[in-house]
């Protein structure tokens, strides 16, 4: 007997419907699975066999063939266990065939040998994609039910065991997971914001905090250079507290990415902007994403938030250079034989580094590094990467008189100022494909970054005397535009350009 059950395969950050077909016929006893499967899916054969047996059913000595279609899409992961088991039981007549062959039902979940249904990754994007194709009923692991319940007009049935699924499909009534009102959760976001670290705790470093405010206001990439203990990491870790709240669309986008990566950790929605801080030993694939069936890397997990690279010069050079294209385009493109995968990478990069291996250059009373050692250490950060940094600022040692002194501005005060600048940008870029000053295209710079005559003269002189690239020239204009917005100015004046140039002269 033949049966078919619908599930989904994860392709990058998208989902593709998969039909799990089973044919049970006479012949030599066997259990074959086909359909371009990786080892995890092939291992489902033993998990499914044991789960069915421990649920109280025995597989007859028949020829069982399971096909996961379409066959040209590679299937990975353990989420096909449950649909395979249901398809087999339907072919054996133990589940009413008409209840599982309906294209309005989608099934996914991993099975333990005892028949318990274990949680899986990617339930939210699966529900979103399947709903667009007209599917309204989903059978998923109980632990993932709330995750899918944030989508309207669908029925999410969280199941604990294979026996529960059999009973449900044979007519036993179960209550679907109640819809989670995302808008109410969004209104309660204030309680989460209070958990953020506060800029008011930072002693001194007013110039660095000013640079951080500018960087966040225009979503500019930022590099902090300074001696150990000068507050580089402390400032970077407080940047999430001054980022404007994500809107509901952004929250859903962030949650979808973290669902695919299996990093929701029991919560059903992400209400904060991500802050990712990978160790300097991270590989380029872990940072950018990859694999035979590519998965998102740290840069995608930081989408709509901050990617913090502490000790930047300690990263492998090829790992840092892998950021070139994503920083420029805001996305990661990974090509494989079976197609191209596009991952979003709309991040604010914040990096920190010591000026040398020992960390104390140019203080020759404490630094013993030679000029060549300093050059080699900082040489790990290539010119093309530095070209993509908008703001570079030195973090000097904290003065003794500043120790313990509270800052006059709290994170909440700074965030309100930044939110006002973001509203200015939102109004300015209506109808454009971008939202921040850092994203203004070269063809639109003259329109949106209107320079006074004196400001134009200053930036032109800086371009010649500092030997800058055209990219850096444009970046200075964008940073100056953000500084002018903070000052409430329509035109970019000489003082704004001068400050923007100052953030480039710090770059070694």
Image (cartoon, helix red, strand yellow):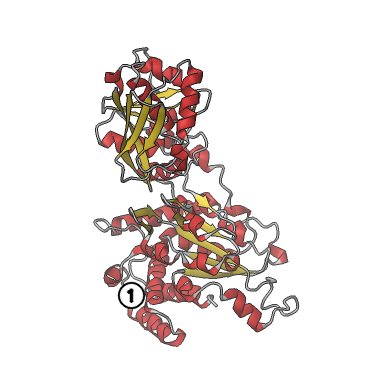
Observer-nearest of 24 and 333: 24
Which quadrant is home to the N terminus? top left
Above or below residue 214? Residue 362 is: below
* Label 1 secondary element: loop
- Nearer to us in this view, 158 or 152: 158
Farthest right residue?
A: 365
Lateral position of residue 371 relative to residue 253, left or right: right
Residue 180 visible in this rendered orientation of the protein: no
Q: Residue at x 35, y 14 (%)?
A: 170
Residue at image position (68%, 82%) is: 370
Q: Residues within 10 Å of mark 1 (few under 14, many from 20)?
A: many
**x%, y% of residue 35?**
34, 40
When asked about the image quadrant of residue 69, the answer is top left
Residue sitting farthest toward the top: 172
Q: In which quarter of the image is the C terminus?
A: bottom right
Q: Where does label 1 land, which residue? A: 451
């Amino acid at each position: 007997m033949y049966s078919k059950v619908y599930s989904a395969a994860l392709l990058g950050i998208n989902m593709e419907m998969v039909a799990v077909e089973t044919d049970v016929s006479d012949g030599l006893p066997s259990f074959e699975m086909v359909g371009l499967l990786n080892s995890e899916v092939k291992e489902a054969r033993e998990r499914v066999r044991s789960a069915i047996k421990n649920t109280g059913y025995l597989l007859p000595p028949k020829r069982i063939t399971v096909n996961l279609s379409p066959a040209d899409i590679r299937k990975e992961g353990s989420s096909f266990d449950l649909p395979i088991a249901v398809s087999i039981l339907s072919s054996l007549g133990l589940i009413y065939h008409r209840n599982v062959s309906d294209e309005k039902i989608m099934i996914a979940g991993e099975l333990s040998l005892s028949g318990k249904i274990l949680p899986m990754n990617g339930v939210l994007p699966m529900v979103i994609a399947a709903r667009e194709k007209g599917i309204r009923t989903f059978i998923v692991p109980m632990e993932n039910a709330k995750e899918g319940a944030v989508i309207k007009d669908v029925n999410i049935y969280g199941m604990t065991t294979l026996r529960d699924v059999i009973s449900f499909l044979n007519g036993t009534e179960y209550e679907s997971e109640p819809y989670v009102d995302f808008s109410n959760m969004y209104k309660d976001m204030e309680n989460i914001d209070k958990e953020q670290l506060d800029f008011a705790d930072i002693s001194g470093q007013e110039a660095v905090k000013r640079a951080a405010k500018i960087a966040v206001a225009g979503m500019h990439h930022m590099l902090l250079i300074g001696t150990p203990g000068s507050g580089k990491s402390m400032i970077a870790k407080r940047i999430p507290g001054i980022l404007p709240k994500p809107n509901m669309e952004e929250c859903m986008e962030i949650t979808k990415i973290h669902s695919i990566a299996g990093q929701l950790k029991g919560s059903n929605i992400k209400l904060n902007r991500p802050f990712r801080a990978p160790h300097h030993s991270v590989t380029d694939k872990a940072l950018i994403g990859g694999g035979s069936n590519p998965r998102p890397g740290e840069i995608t997990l930081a989408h709509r938030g901050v990617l913090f690279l502490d000790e930047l010069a300690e990263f492998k050079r090829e790992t840092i250079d892998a950021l070139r294209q994503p920083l420029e385009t805001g996305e990661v493109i990974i090509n494989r034989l079976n197609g191209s995968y596009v991952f979003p990478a709309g991040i604010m990069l914040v990096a920190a580094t010591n000026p040398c291996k020992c960390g104390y250059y140019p203080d020759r009373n404490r630094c013993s590094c030679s000029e060549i050692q300093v050059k080699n250490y900082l040489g790990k950060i290539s010119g093309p990467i530095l070209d993509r940094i908008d703001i570079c600022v030195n973090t000097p040692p904290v003065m003794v008189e500043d120790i313990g002194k509270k800052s006059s501005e709290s994170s909440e005060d700074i965030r309100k100022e930044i939110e006002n600048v973001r509203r200015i940008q939102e109004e300015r870029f209506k109808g454009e494909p971008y939202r921040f000053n850092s994203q203004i295209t070269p063809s639109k710079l003259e329109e949106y970054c209107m320079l006074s005559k004196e400001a134009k003269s200053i930036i032109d002189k800086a371009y010649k005397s500092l030997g800058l690239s055209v990219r850096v020239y444009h970046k200075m204009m964008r940073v100056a535009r953000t500084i002018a917005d903070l000052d409430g100015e329509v035109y970019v004046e000489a003082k704004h350009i001068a400050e923007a140039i100052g953030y480039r002269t710090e770059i070694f």
